[in-house]
Image: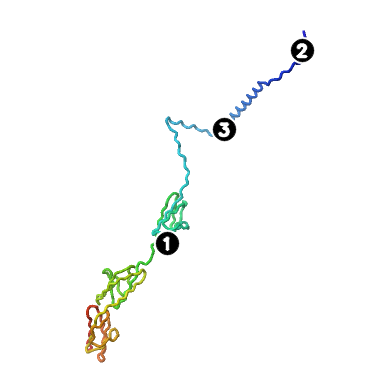
């Protein structure tokens, strides 16, 4: 029996072990699964549980809820009116023109309003709200200009000042009348004097009226005779007739060298011829 050949024959190349590769893959897969399970647990621990929404009723539609719209709230507005109009307006010390005026963009707060005119100043504190128009009305003092004046009448005899059949005053005094035009009658019944007159009264002023009295006729006589003076002036010797004198009171003086002197107070009227006579012998 031939001995066996113990020489090493050609060595075949080694094949990779299928078991080793398979084992490694399984190990990696196991690690991945364990890591995934741990990560899932960690995620559930961080997020709270969410309840499932109830199922919609059959046939119900999905409604889209309106989204809230963000909008800026409108600022307050202030309407300022004055009576009479045309007053200067200030809000919190800042000028805003003449009334009436509407002021926009005011903050929701209290604001000090000042209005000024030639007749005075008015102030008020007003609360303004966002998105609201607040109206403020001021009644300003009216101008205090004079609305009346006075009339004076200068006359040698007393006269009444008559307007619409009513006596509104007498000569020699200040008569207050409303400013403007007046149709009056200046009258004295005792001397027969009556004169219509148009008077324009200026506000706050005195309007002077002078009467130019009409003339009346006077006859003068004395017994036995006398020199005659009227209001201190010599006019002649009795008898005297048709002396022209202004209506009203006069002093007539009779003077005689032996019988002395006598003075008579008379009133000359516009009604016909006036007469005066004395007897110095008595």
The answer to which of 264 and 163 lies nearer the viewer is 163
Q: Does label 1 or label 3 sit earlier along the sequence? A: 3
Mark 3 lies on a secondary structure that is helix
The answer to which of 135 and 207 lies nearer the viewer is 207
Q: Which mark is residue 117?
A: 1
Q: Which residue is mark 2?
A: 5
How many C-alpha atoms fall within 10 Å of the one at disc 3: few (<14), some, or many (≥20)?
few
Q: Residue furthest top?
A: 1
Q: Nearer the viewer, mark 1 or mark 3?
A: 1
Image x and y of residue 135, in percent: 41, 53
Q: Residue drawn 77% across and 15% down?
A: 7
Is 229 drawn above or below residue 170 in the view shown? below
Image x and y of residue 17, in percent: 67, 21
Q: Nearer the viewer, mark 2 or mark 1?
A: 2
Q: CA distance from mark 1 to mark 3?
A: 77 Å
Q: Which residue is mark 3?
A: 43
How many C-alpha atoms fall within 10 Å of the one at disc 2: few (<14), some, or many (≥20)?
few
């Amino acid at each position: 029996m031939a001995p066996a050949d113990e020489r090493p024959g050609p060595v075949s190349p080694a094949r990779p072990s299928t078991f080793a590769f398979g084992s490694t893959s399984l190990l990696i897969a196991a690690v991945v699964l364990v890591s995934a399970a741990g990560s899932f647990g960690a995620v559930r621990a961080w997020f709270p549980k969410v309840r499932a929404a109830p199922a919609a009723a059959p046939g119900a539609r999905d409604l889209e809820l309106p989204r809230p719209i963000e909008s800026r709230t409108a600022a307050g507005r202030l309407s300022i009116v004055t009576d009479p109009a045309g007053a200067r307006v200030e809000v919190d010390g800042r000028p805003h023109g003449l009334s009436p005026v509407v002021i926009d963009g005011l903050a929701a707060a209290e604001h000090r309003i000042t209005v000024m005119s030639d007749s005075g100043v008015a102030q008020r504190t007003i609360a303004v709200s966002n998105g609201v128009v607040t109206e403020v009305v001021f009644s300003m003092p009216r101008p205090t200009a004079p609305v009346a004046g006075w009339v004076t009448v200068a006359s040698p005899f007393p006269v009444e000042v008559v307007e619409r059949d009513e006596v509104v005053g007498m000569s020699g005094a200040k008569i207050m009348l409303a400013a403007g035009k007046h149709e009056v009658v200046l009258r004295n019944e005792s001397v027969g004097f009556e004169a219509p007159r148009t008077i324009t009264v200026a506000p706050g002023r005195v309007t002077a009226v002078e009467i130019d009295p009409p003339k009346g006729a006077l006859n003068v006589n004395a017994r036995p005779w006398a020199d005659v003076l009227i209001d201190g002036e010599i006019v002649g010797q009795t008898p005297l007739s048709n002396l022209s004198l202004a209506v009203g009171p006069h002093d007539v003086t009779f003077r005689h060298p032996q019988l002395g002197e006598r003075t008579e107070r008379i009133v000359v009227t516009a009604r016909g011829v006036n007469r005066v006579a004395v007897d110095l012998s008595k």
